[in-house]
Amino acid sequence: MRRREFVTLLGSAVTWPLVVRAQQSALPVIGYLDSRASGDAPQRLAAFLQGLKDTGFVDGKNVAIEYRFAENRDERLPALAEDLAQRHVVAIAAAGTPAALAAKAATTTIPVVFETGADPVRLGLIAQLNRPGGNVTGVTNTSLEVAPKRLELLHQFLPSASVMALLVDPSMAALAETQSRSMQSAAHSLGLDLHILNASTERDFDAVFANLTQLRAAGLVIGGGAFLVTQQERLAALATRHAVPAVGEYREFAAAGGLASYGSSLTDSYRLTGVYVARVLKGERPDDLPVQQSAKVELYINLKTAKALGITVPIPVLGRADGAIE
């Protein structure tokens, strides 16, 4: 090889990585903020990425994503949100209510797209659903509306029972109050006595299951909220150990040994969140994007657990299940 050709080739080899890095740095950067640990519920993150892809954006190809996970420590979220704001990302996707509140507090200019099961108006995230105002919009799921249905489902599993219990997280006072009120209304219509039990740390769980025995509660409904959602597998294991029929919110609960789960499809709401972030990337303003609601719900039944508890799953309930875990 002649010297001139070699020098030209060497120059290309040196400059090519620099060009690639320059192209990568030119990509718009999204911030992804989540209170969970990075390995938790990977299907939700996959759904978010699918929503981006469906609308024309692929991570590493024409958009870059900066991930920030609080590792199930919500107190870390404000600093993580502030870090994303200081990096001047073009948008922040906030996964869950605590992340949404932290992102809103961190910036009034960067678009924030949230996913939450709570009322975003009551939380102060937006002014109104159809015209959010400001820099925040997003997607809600039907967690609050569906919650009483979990008690109805448990009653179908245990038709002769007269006493049930609901577990809520008192540290999320507004959510706990709303859930308790709606569940008590459902219990009254079903002719049930419903006891409200509290847990805001893992240390509270032993007392919860001890109280179930003292109250003679036949079954347990797991309430919503970030803490209880992250503890689904632990709660399912405790319900199995204490032989308590329990119904949780998401599939992970039934898969971990809980009797059943009934709640919003988070994969659907996270996909819609990805779609909304993509629309912001294409130039739409958050205050012009009305809050969407994911109306899809899912029912999963753990047949192995039902058998161990001596529960016969009603045929109509089994017929409408999205999945049976054996």
Image (spheres, rainbow, N blue to C red):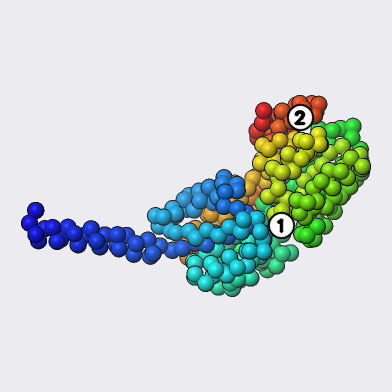
Q: Which residue is mark 1?
A: 118
Residue drawn 70% across the image and 67% down it: 124
State the SS at label 2. Answer: helix
The image quarter containing residue 136 is bottom right
Determine crowd level at label 2: few under 14, some 14-19, many 20+ residues with C-alpha closer than 10 A: some
**Amino acid type, callout 2:** Ala
Instruction: Tell me the amino acid under the disc marked 1.
Output: Ala
Q: Nearer the viewer, mark 1 or mark 2?
A: 2
Disc 2: which residue: 306
Q: Where is residue 146 drawn, in percent x and y?
A: 74, 47
Residue 27 drawn at (x, y percent): 40, 62
Residue lying at 43% horizontally and 63% vertically, measured from the top left: 28
Camera-nearest residue between 208 and 229: 208
Where's residue 317, x and y in %? Answer: 74, 31
How crowded pointer 1 is (Cα within 10 Å; few <14, some 14-19, many 20+) is rated as many
Does residue 277 lie above or below 191 as drawn?
Answer: below
Q: Considering depth in this image, is 264 or 247 the residue closer to the camera?
A: 247
The residue sitting at 84% across, 38% down in the picture is 219
Kindly state the secondary structure of the residue where label 1 is placed. Answer: loop
Are the residues tagged 1 and 2 within 8 Å (C-beta)? Answer: no
Which quadrant of the figure has residue 242? top right
Which mark, residue 39? none
Residue 38 position in % (x across, y down): 57, 52
The number of numbered discs placed on residues in the rendered structure image is 2
